[in-house]
Amino acid sequence: MTDTLEKTITVAVAGNPNSGKTTIFNRLTGARQHVGNYPGVTVEWKEGSVRRGDWRLKLYDLPGTYSLTAFSDEELVARDFLLNHRPDVVVDVVDASNLERNLFLTTELLEIGLPVVLVLNMSDVARDSGHRIDTHLLARRLGVPVVAAVGNKGQGLEDLIEAVTEVAISGTSLPGPADLCREAGPATEALAHLSTHSGGLRPDYGPVAERHLKRIAALLPTGESARWRTIKLLERDNAVLEEIPDPEVRREILHIAEEFAGQADKGATDTVLAASRYEFITKLCDGVLRRDKQDGPSVSDRIDRWTMHPVWGVPIFLGLMYGVFTLTFGLGNPVMDLLDRGFTALGGLISGLWPAGGTSPLRSLLVDGVIGGVGGVVVFVPNIVLLFLAIAVLEGTGYMARAAFVMDRFMSKVGLHGKSFIPLLIGFGCTVPAIMATRTLESRRDRLITIMVLPLMSCGARLPIYALMIPAFFPSHLQGPVLWIIYVTGIVLALVGARLLRATLFKGENTPFVMELPPYRLPTVDSLLVQMWTRAWLYVKKAGTVILGAAIILWFLTVYPKPPADYVVPAGFDKTTISSETQFSQLQDPAQIQSAELSYSIAGRVGRVLETVLRPLGFDWRIGTALVGAVAAKEVFVAQMGIVFAVGEVDETSDVLRHRLRERYAPLVGFCIMLFTLISTPCIATFAITRQETGSLKWAIAQNLGLTLLAWVVTFIAFHGGTMLGLGGT
Amino acid sequence: MPLSQVQEGARTVLKAIDGGHELRGRLAALGLLPGTELEVIRNSGHGPFVIAVKGSRVVIGRGMASRIEVELGQP
């Protein structure tokens, strides 16, 4: 019966980005955490729990924010959680070496009126750089418990848990008013004019603002977070305003807010309240914060002299990226091969359960559909895990912000920020994690543009197609340049596409590029592993379930309907294999049977219908049928080509298939096939992740149609341009 | 003068931001508001800026920097 005795405390962990909030959260909850997304928006959301005696602390890691305004999804999510879920305690993690800026969010959290526990994180770094903080005085002034901690070393976390439980038991973080008076020293007297709000000091916005705040407050029902709501309304916060049901009251409030804005100093109407907050913080920190040393150039500044150097910054960045890819593919590929062999063996094992030679739909479904489909995704897991580890290292050390700085010079030319470069680069590995990596972009517009053009970065799954086609059609001295042309075409199209989207669908001024540059830090191994694991698991879960479904559907499309015994395989159906009209039942060669079956199936029929559209590109129904398969995953194209050409099981190294291809198509068509598979229809996993990350089916469909149309146009130009230049012959 | 014309190493005071309600709010939360001291840490003549404000380093795009009006000197 321990469950009934156990009491749960819900705790929201809030703080600025780079305050070490997530490190503390990971330290507290360990592996017992769960990552998800807030419905509708793609802000990552984590929860975990800690047990202490009879208490269970349920922790929610809120997105890192600088304030609780309504300017980004992160901020909306954070404040929605605080206002509507009303956690029992808010743990506010602040970077002790950057106290004043971090306390800005604290003032807002205090105004929301929930019990707060303040954590001075990285207090060792702060001490070493000469910041002396009087935590007792700060606690007395704010009227909340203040805990000094070092998150990455796990110091101070037991104190934190104790403070949280105490606050939850007493239902308030405020020491008794008597306590505060008794402890009040001379420094507190200097703050006497600041409003003393139920025991702790809170910002006072001056007589003019306070008068307007009172007028607004009179129009609102009293209740939880009333003070915070009133302040937000004076700041003309739309989201808070819209929550007021009565349009009459809304108009009245807006009128008061505009009147106030008119009275404030010109040029500062929007920031007059923010300025008051900083004034409050300055007074609050007087006597609390002392600097022993003057700030000279820090270690970070010295490293930045190289990493952000106008000349050396770019090569350093490119070198690191080269390292990331070598790690991802160099270490990942052997494991990937091992997994691939494992799945093949498993397929063989299950196949062996049926009598040899017979056909069984169930066996085919299990081996070709389920194992083939899911295996196709799972083999990429080693690469993805390593890629996420590399990203975690780059983010954890603080280098990611420098990379964005370095690349901004180039990216700004196509109307994007430096930050967009990182996902584009990951796109060479796999589009799915790349789209997930666009979460670091604040502007929704930048995010959408980046997601839309991302599939143009040639991902690893297209490589088997190139590996099959290039040696089939091009002599060895041209193979390298052709591969290079394909990759560069993708990059150029992505950049041009971004520029065009920016000028048409996503018009408007450049979103201002503002980003905090965190100091370099040594990330802890467990925080890297936790981050890597949670993201990789999300990939396996999401892409795995979608791929499984898609694989089964595509398996069905390529297998059914089965041709009847009296089905007459048309003459010239495939000159290389079937010379004259033959009844299906008379076919002997299993490869011929498979080929005839595929041509009779839905996929084969779709391929024939597609032929009319693909003919202008130099493609026939065989290529059309293989393209249907490529929708599941790009590399499936190779296997499908093997089946349509009746050469049986093939991979990208099949010389028989290459020979058949060479017989049938000109090198120009081979090139066009690569071009078309590069640009057209992203795989089903990309479709699913785009839908998830943009929050709407509309963008996923637009991406698919847009890219397929672009593929058609580009391939058309390449085919006819090439033919005119006399490259169409064999 | 606009921040975009300030040399590396110079100390300035923010005077005004040419931008909407939202932009000013976002910058204020990062510590950028009229009356704050800004030190230009990096300005290589092209690409974004790095400034020191309230104890942290902030990267600001060149376009953005031209919309921030500053005055040389300390508050």
Image (cartoon, grey):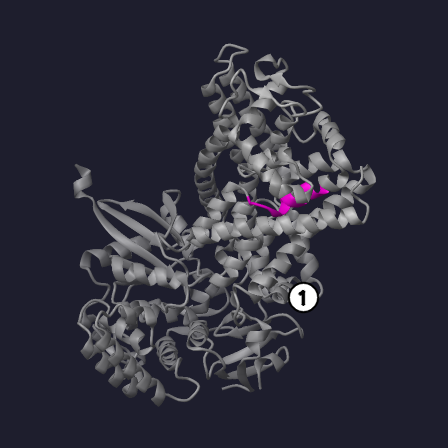
x, y percent for residue A167: 23, 59
Considering depth in this image, is A263 or A620 the residue closer to the camera? A620
Task: For the C terminus of chain A, give its image quadrant.
Answer: top right
- Crowding around mark 1 (Cα neighbors within 10 Å: few <14, some 14 to 19, many 20+) is some
Q: Is residue B6 above or below residue A475?
A: below
Q: Is residue A437 above or below residue A179?
A: above
Q: Is residue A431 above or below residue A518?
A: above
Asked whether A672 falls inside the magenta stretch, the response is yes
x, y percent for residue A246: 21, 72
Considering depth in this image, is A621 or A526 the residue closer to the camera? A621
Helix, strand or loop status at disc 1: loop
x, y percent for residue A335: 59, 32
Query: Relative to B53, is A479 on the left or the right?
Result: right
Magenta-drawn segment: A671-682
Provide the major secondary structure of the magenta segment. Answer: helix
Residue drawn at (45%, 61%), measured in percent from left and top?
A17
Give the quarter of the image for residue A19: bottom left
Q: Is residue A120 visible?
A: no
Residue drawn at (68%, 53%), measured in percent from left and top?
A319
x, y percent for residue A457: 62, 50
Q: Residue furthest top?
A: A355
Q: Is residue A614 above or below residue A59?
A: above
Considering depth in this image, is A515 or A669 the residue closer to the camera? A669
Query: Relative to A337, is A238 on the left or the right?
Result: left
Residue drawn at (32%, 71%), measured in percent from left and top?
A137
- Disc 1 marks which amino acid? His
Query: Relative to A33, is A724 on the left or the right?
Result: right
- Residue bearing the label numbered 1: A309
